Amino acid sequence: MEKVRRLRWDLARGEAPAARELARLLGPATEFNVAFDLPWPWGGEQFELREVRPLNYIIGPLGSGKTRLARRIAEALPDAAFLGLERLADGGAAAQARLDADPALKARVDQTIAWLVEDGGMVSKALVALLTGLESEGPSILVIDMLEQGLDKATQEALIAYLRRRGPYGRPLFFLTRSNAILDLDAVGADEAIILCTANHSPPTRVAPYHGAPGYEAVATSLASPEVRARTAGVIAWRPKVA
């Protein structure tokens, strides 16, 4: 099914497959697998991450362990880095300092901002901080905490469209999200994967983006509009200390 979805995705974009590509589709899928033990709140079960895609959504309700899983993925995958919410500290001052010291990076960020603004996005310190991490050279894989943090709906939609346009050869990204502007289940393509962390702390699972698939409803109910997400910004799950 994944091979067919990828072929249809390419055809929809006007890209007819070459003969060698058809031959590859007939063969086994290339997989990048890594296995590691899950951190708390899981019980130390082993988790196998298979077929890393250019866009990998990490989704789940509050307290389901999304951030802990993301950090563990960044530790386990080779040449990966974690971009946390500290990027927003002091109005993104650290990102601005990096841009001031690196003209090439600033040029890439400015170009991306121009594309996003053309698609309806709005410039903000949160966007600049995020793009500074996205456009920086270095790690082969980037894991991002709450991709949409600080961004309005139009900017979120422009951002995910930009990330999708990178195609199947873009640097793999893992990112947490609870926004249905970022994760539009009707728009998920062949180069994307959804990883669900459940409220009962069962091991995370891959979820197919269609009605009736195991876990689909749980993913759908974990998402909310950017307006609702803005009202609940800063809410965290807290575990009381046991005496």
Image (spheres, helix red, strand yellow):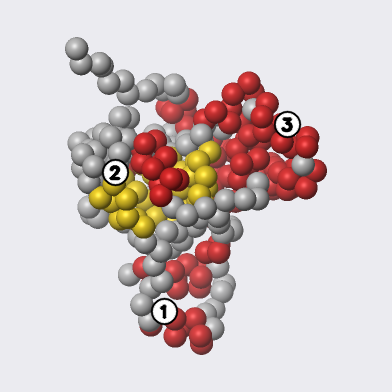
SS category of the residue bearing label 2 = loop
Residue reaching furthest top? Answer: 243
Mark 3 vs mark 1, foreground winner is 3
SS category of the residue bearing label 3 = helix
Residue 18 in the image: state x and y as whole percent: 54, 83
Tell me: residue 8, above or below residue 76: below
Residue that carries the numbered disc 3 in the rendered image: 97
Question: If you read the primary sequence from the N terminus, does the residue marked by circle 3 or circle 1 appear first?
Answer: 1
Mark 2 vs mark 3, CA separation in Å: 35 Å
| CB under 8 Å between discs 1 and 2 | no
Asked where in the image residue 188 lies, by quadrant, the reply is bottom left
x 41%, y 79%: residue: 25
- Whether residue 162 is visible to the viewer of this picture, yes or no, is yes
Q: Is residue 190 left or right of residue 219?
A: right
The C terminus lies in which quarter of the figure? top left
Q: Pick the residue in front: 235 or 86.
A: 86
SS category of the residue bearing label 1 = helix
Q: Is residue 35 left or right of residue 232?
A: left
Residue that carries the numbered disc 2 in the rendered image: 38
Residue 171 in the image: state x and y as whole percent: 55, 56
Mark number, residue 83? none
Residue that carries the numbered disc 1 in the rendered image: 25
The three-letter amino acid code for the residue at tag 2 is Leu
Question: If you read the primary sequence from the N terminus, does the residue marked by circle 1 or circle 2 appear first?
Answer: 1
The three-letter amino acid code for the residue at tag 1 is Leu
Question: If you read the primary sequence from the N terminus, does the residue marked by circle 2 or circle 3 appear first?
Answer: 2
Tell me: residue 243, above or below residue 48: above
- Mark 3 crowd level (few <14, some 14–19, many ≥20, 10 Å Cα): few
- Mark 2 crowd level (few <14, some 14–19, many ≥20, 10 Å Cα): many
Mark 1 vs mark 2, foreground winner is 2
